[in-house]
Image: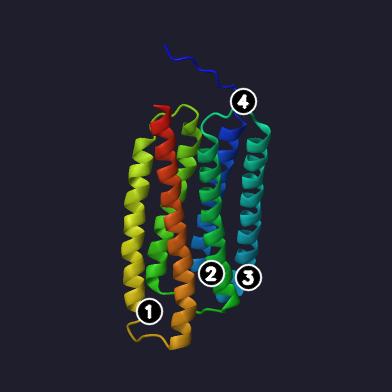
């Protein structure tokens, strides 16, 4: 018989759920940016900055709880990795929005919308998966789909690079746009890190 000596404290699960929900906010602000006039982008960037700060606060809360809790619901290292990866996603999305505004970029390539669609879907899946950590059930489809989405993001990213270096843009615009799409690609990679960490946790707890 396996004895469960872990506490009933649930704050970690609730904080991870909060972080996941915040990623949906960030992804939807990215999508809002794509359809906005350049004059409206600064306001969206401010909203995104507020979402990024909320993500930082959620991450700091998890770290404080980790430092103050003797027995954790799963491995301390995995709690740290999961919190950090969730935070990374938001950081990269916020950086992409900030660069669009700072560089005063005009029209974005249509493929950027494909990147954002992937990130929005990944955010929704992540937000839905975080509450399921409590029971450690029905998570395998999450990391399988997240890895599929990351592969899709890689394909979109390669198409974008081909478009950027295809001669349609001047050299300075290419540099600006590449920084933006690189941040979005980093966000997709960070989502994959979230999925891999969840898989590691589930395997250890099975």
Q: Earlier in the sequence, mark 2 or mark 3?
A: 2
What is the CA distance from the residue labelled 3 to the residue labelled 1? 24 Å
Q: Mark 3 touching mark 1, by CB under 8 A?
A: no
On screen, residue 22 versus residue 46, left or right, reads left
The residue indicated by pointer 1 is: 164
Callout 2 crowding tier (Cα within 10 Å): few <14, some 14–19, many ≥20: few
The residue indicated by pointer 2 is: 36
For the point 33% across and 43% down, which residue is it?
144
Locate residue 155, reporting x and y percent. 31, 63
The residue indicated by pointer 4 is: 9
What is the CA distance from the residue labelled 1 to the residue labelled 2? 22 Å
What is the CA distance from the residue labelled 4 to the residue labelled 1? 50 Å
The residue indicated by pointer 3 is: 42
Between 73 and 128, the one nearer to me in the picture: 73
Quarter holding the N terminus is top left
What is the CA distance from the residue labelled 2 to the residue labelled 3? 10 Å
Q: Mark 4 touching mark 1, by CB under 8 A?
A: no
Callout 4 crowding tier (Cα within 10 Å): few <14, some 14–19, many ≥20: few
What is the CA distance from the residue labelled 4 to the residue labelled 3? 41 Å
């Amino acid at each position: 018989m396996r004895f469960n000596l872990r506490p009933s404290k649930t704050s970690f699960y609730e904080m991870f759920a909060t972080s996941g929900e915040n990623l949906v906010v960030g992804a939807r602000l990215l999508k809002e940016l794509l359809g906005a006039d350049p004059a409206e982008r600064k306001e969206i960037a401010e909203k995104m900055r507020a979402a990024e700060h909320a993500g930082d606060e959620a991450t700091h809360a998890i770290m404080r709880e980790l430092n103050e809790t003797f027995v954790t619901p799963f491995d301390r290292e995995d709690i740290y990795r999961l919190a950090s990866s969730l935070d990374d996603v938001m950081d990269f999305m916020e950086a992409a929005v900030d660069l669009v505004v700072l560089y005063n970029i005009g029209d974005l390539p249509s493929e950027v919308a494909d990147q954002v669609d992937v990130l929005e879907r990944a955010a929704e899946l992540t937000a839905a998966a975080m509450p399921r950590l409590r029971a450690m059930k029905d998570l395998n489809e999450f990391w399988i789909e997240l890895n599929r989405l990351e592969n899709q993001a890689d394909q979109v990213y390669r198409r974008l690079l081909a478009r950027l270096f295809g001669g349609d843009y001047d050299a300075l615009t290419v540099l600006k746009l590449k920084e933006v799409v690189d941040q979005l690609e980093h966000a997709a990679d960070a989502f994959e890190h979230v999925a891999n960490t969840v898989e590691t946790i589930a395997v250890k707890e099975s």
